[in-house]
Amino acid sequence: MKLPVNHALSLAALMLLGAGGAGARDREARLSAPPVTGPAADYPVVVGEPFTIGSTVWTPIDQLNYDAVGFASIGEAGLVGVTGAHKTLPLPSYVEVTALDTGKTILVRLERRGPMFNDTLIELSSAAATQLGLVPGGRSPVRVRRVNPPEQERAILRAGDRAPERMETPDGLLKVLRRKLADQSPLQPPPSMPPSMPAGTPASPIAKPAPKPVEIAPNSPGRAPAPSPVAAPTPAVSSRKPLTPSIAAAPVPKGAFFVQVAAFSVEANARKVAAQLNGGISRAGKLWRVRLGPFANRAKAAPALEKARNAGYRDARIQPAD
């Protein structure tokens, strides 16, 4: 006896078998696909939403010129690679971390949010802390500066290895950074950029010139006889250094360089900034320039440029002497 054949059922079974085979092939293709490398391995970049720690609101932002000082803590021992946690910079991003005790600087990849303490700037993995020479069990003063390293160094960090160490920070710059850290409130978010003085704010009252005496001709009617000239006493010469920077320009060696900090339309403002940075002022048309130097070459001017930018003058630059 011939049994009836259900053709619809057979067709459905074939479709299921075909779908299962295609799914298996897709899974195989995904597993055998090479890992993402190159710049694409750092994407997508996540900024994230604002969050609160205690009563402080932290707002993540993609800030290219981030440069701040604060304290670093060491995270759990299970964290992999030379990595770190930061509250506001994009994830992932790359920063140079400098130990303010020693001047040693390393490259770190930021991969997570944290640390969840308002008075701590960055959390480092144990591998990053070891490379930087930090002592476990406490917080260490550091500088964190966002950088854009070459792809070769990015790939090294993504693989969990150490990137080459940077040049050690000069002692002069370390002193400036330590003073900046000492002056900032530890319970507030460390500034992403140093504050700059508002333009046009008078630094100190400007003395008005004394009125010029009116000259009277010798033979004018009613003029009293002129008294005999008496030699005025010679004022004592003070050895104290003037508090305000001198405008007189000393001879500048040929081929020298200056760090131009800023230019002001108000002389008093220029004098105040020059006094803060131990620089000088010079007039250029209607403006008063604040400059540091002169320096024999660009390399010797570099610490002064860093000092000016850390003081808030991000447009400071090195230029040849006029």
Image: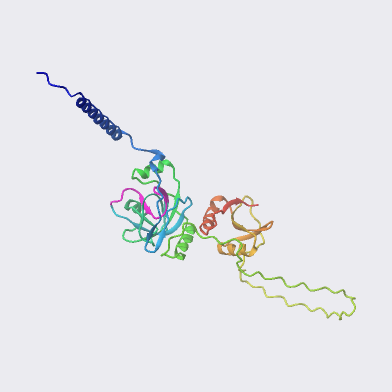
| Residue 258 belongs to the span the image colors magenta | no
Q: Tell which of 240 and 46 is nearer to you.
A: 46
Q: Residue at x 20, y 25 (%)?
A: 10
Q: Is residue 29 above or below residue 296?
A: above
Residue 167 visible in the snapshot: no
Look at the magenta stretch and give its main secondary structure: loop
Q: Magenta segment, which residues?
A: 78-95
Q: Tell which of 127 and 45 is nearer to you.
A: 45
Query: In the visual, does 178 lie left or right of 258?
Result: left
Image coords of residue 255 (percent x, y): 62, 50
Q: Quadrant of residue 116?
A: bottom left
Image coords of residue 127 (percent x, y): 33, 51
Q: Residue at x 46, y 57 (%)?
A: 192
Image coords of residue 269 (percent x, y): 61, 63
Q: Tell which of 225 and 125 is nearer to you.
A: 125
Query: In the visual, does 303 lie left or right of 153?
Result: right
